[in-house]
Amino acid sequence: QVTLRESGPVLVKPTETLTLTCTVSGFSLTNPRLGVSWLRQPPGKALEWLAHLFSNDEKSYRASLKSRLTISKDTSKSQVVLIMTNMDPEDTATYYCARTTYGSGNYDFDYWGQGTLVTVSS
Amino acid sequence: DIQMTQSPSSLSASVGHRVTITCRASQSIGRSLNWYQQKPGKAPKLLIYAASSLQSGVPSRFSGSGSGTDFTLTISSLQPEDFATYCCQQSYSVPFTFGPGTKVDIK
């Protein structure tokens, strides 16, 4: 079955760099219709899409955060990594990775990891 | 960015009742609209994709409709496990954006 699992630090200090890893199973990162997205949800707030990566190495980033984000993959390890630089307390949120399926002009997030709460505090 | 709004922000309903939630996009998005259910402390779950297609494994009491800027999620007969927050998401253009959510609780 399809699973995704996020891993990374639960606490980072302001100005530090956050590295999150999404380890996937049950599908291939080489499938042209499938990708992995990173999203986040601050406590009590709406979901926010951050970036996605598809098998053809198509990458897309949230424009307002683009200078701080890097998404990459290691197909041999079935992992997708998100790096976010210069962390700020406003980046405190639950971070999710989600399988992204493309079809007929629509992208949807059909499988999700359990999420990891990242707190930014000194 | 395309802004997504939802109404109502919350509602109370009884088991067995029909529930309708509306989502509106700030510009036309065709049918590039998905609906998710989220329970406290859990990841969202995809219910409806491409405005009206039922995700595999989701009960048929859930349905979606609409195109352009106005969309609707309907639960035909509310069940105890349906009490949750529902949000819409557009995938017409990046950044993909979500609505603020509609919380459905027990009346």
Image: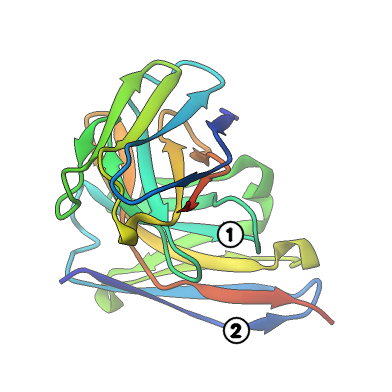
Q: Residues within 10 Å of mark 1 (few under 14, many from 20)?
A: some
- Rendering coords of residue A121 (x, y %): 80, 78
Please, what is the three-letter code of the amino acid marked with disc 2?
Answer: Pro
- Looking at the image, which is closer to me, B3 or A36? B3
Circle 2 packing at 10 Å, graded few (<14), some (14-19), many (20+), is few
Same-chain check, marks 1 and 2: yes
Say which residue appears at 21% left-offset and 46% top-offset: A33
Label 1, label 2: how many angstroms apart (C-alpha)? 16 Å
Q: Which residue position holds label 1? A: A41
Q: Earlier in the sequence, mark 1 or mark 2?
A: 2
Q: Give the residue pinned by disc 2.
A: A9
Give the image quarter of residue A119: bottom right
Q: Residue at x 45, y 29 (%)?
A: B22
Q: Disc 2 sits on a residue from what chain?
A: A
Give yes or no for contact between labels 1 and 2 (Cβ–Cβ under 8 Å). no
Work out whether residue B60 or residue A21 is closer to the camera in this orientation and state it: B60
Q: Is residue A120 above or below residue B78?
A: below
Q: Quadrant of the C terminus of chain A?
A: bottom right
Does any portion of residue A109 appear in the rendered image?
Answer: yes
Q: Is residue A114 above or below residue A34?
A: below
Residue B32 spot, x, y in % from top left: 35, 29
| Disc 2 element | loop
Q: Secondary structure at mark 1?
A: strand
| Residue B24 in the image, given as x and y percentages of width and height | 50, 24
Q: Chain of mark 1?
A: A
